[in-house]
Amino acid sequence: MQTQITEKTETLEVVHHSPNPSNPTSQVDFLVLKIASRCNLNCTYCYMYNLGDKTYLQQPKFMSEEVIDTMLERVIEHVHKHHLTAFAFGFHGGEPLLAGKAFFINFVNKTNALFAKHNITPNYFIQTNGVLLTRSIGKLFNELKIQIGVSLDGTEEINDAFRIDHKGKGTYQRVVAGINKLEDNRHPVTGKIRVGLLNVMNLNCDPVELYYHYSNVVNVESFDLLFPLANYQVAPFVPSKGPFSKSLTPYADWMLIMFHLWFNDKSAARPHIRLFDMLIKQVLGASASLDSIGNKDNGLLVIETDGGIEPSDVLKSCGNGITKQNLNIKTNALDDALDKELVATYVHNGQYLSETCKRCPIVEMCGGGYMPHRYSKVNGFNNPSIYCKDLIKLISEIQSTVVDNLPREILDLYPLEKLNYTEIINEIYAQSYAS
Ligand code: SF4
């Protein structure tokens, strides 16, 4: 899939648009910590190491105690300034488990003690490739209240096409073995493993097979579907043969097969699928959002192993060095990052919209799509998502399905209309062509 990304990326001038720097409510409440800047795997589509950005070569391999202490001081300053009562940390890499168990014990104990003095609730997450998981790590993360996310891209054949190690060997067997070691992380009633899988979609994978594979074979509580990283420079992968090859909305068609299966699944094995859960909440009027979709701000920054403050690391897929902001927690407050245009654009992703998105009837739900999917050399991030048509189809069909399944008396109280994909496309794009 993402091996399609062959264009050599280079240091790029970022072209922005309509900045809205006067948002006084901006606040960061989530730091993604790059605690290890190397990985034991070598996935071909990895935006950290294999999509053109080589800045990791200048990074220390691990986050030092000094960086952690300074970062925590910055967090305390920030939390008081913005009157926050909770703050979250995501352990990330490279592969964060390379940091070793002692790192997590030290970090969480230190942070919990500090936060207790300031009445702040901490939340912890880890995103791992799963290969180094053991039963004792699972137990430890239970004790430390670290929620586990594992990256896996489907069945063995599909996963191993791209998620490989440094010898070119597939990793599926080792990842699933790692997940199965988490005996102490099972739900006491359902027996499902309390892990969230992150799955990059692959149109060569049968969505029906994938659904049952995750629900019944890998047996996890939840998973999420990510669009492959693509933009106006690097087109999304579409297979030349098969059921999605001729579609204008292949990713939506693929996802909708899974959506209908999931929506109608009344079994105990039914997992949470984060994207679908979130879209249904939005249809029903809840304030829900992910950084990849929706109109809410993303109060998220990345702290590199050397203390560098950066916007989301997925933007590395748009060019070598693009996320470097010349900011470091040793000399800067977290708020300083919000003065940087690229960071502000990411944090207010759903407000920095192209003209096309501004007139879109589903912009509240879509938010213009994920920022790296908007990138072009000509307009920077001033474009609708490269997956715009897929998003319109996905959102309109999910809303229509929900409407079809709501009781009449609820619809009388809360009028909610079905959406029509073709009408929305005509409304948005007819005007684009006219202007
Ligand atoms: S569906 Fe397309 S036009 Fe509408 S907000 Fe999303 S990216 Fe923009």
Image: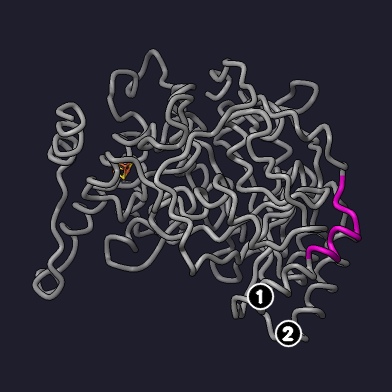
Q: Nearer the viewer, residue 184 or 13?
A: 13
For the point 74% across and 38% down, which residue is it? 174
Q: Is residue 228 left or right of residue 331?
A: left
The magenta segment? 62-71
Q: Amino acid at mark 1?
A: Val
For the point 80% across and 35% down, which residue is it? 40
Indicate whether 125 appears above or below 261.
below
Numbered marks: total? 2
Is 91 colored magenta in this rendering? no
Q: Where does residue 81 sit, x and y in percent of width and height?
A: 64, 77
Query: Magenta-highlighted stretch: main secondary structure?
Result: helix
Q: Image quarter for residue 10? A: top right
Q: Where does residue 209 sit, x and y in percent of width and height?
A: 44, 36
Q: Nearer the viewer, residue 272 or 425?
A: 425
Q: Where does residue 142 sit, x and y in percent of width and height?
A: 73, 68
User: Does the image show residue 271?
Assistant: no
Q: Quick one: SS at disc 1?
A: helix
Q: Quick one: SS at disc 2?
A: loop
Q: Name the residue that disc number 2 marks.
A: 118
Indicate whether 320 appears above or below 427.
above
C-beta proximity under 8 Å, tags 2 and 1: yes
Task: Check the image and name the residue furthest to the top.
Answer: 240
Q: Name the residue that disc number 1 marks.
A: 79
Q: Is residue 364 left or right of residue 429?
A: right
Q: Is residue 256 left or right of residue 39?
A: left
For the point 21% across and 49% down, which residue is it? 361
For the point 79% across and 70% down, which residue is it? 73
Q: Where does residue 322 sit, x and y in percent of width and height?
A: 63, 35
Q: Amino acid at mark 2?
A: His
- Label 2 Cα crowd, 10 Å radius (few <14 / some 14-19 / many 20+): few
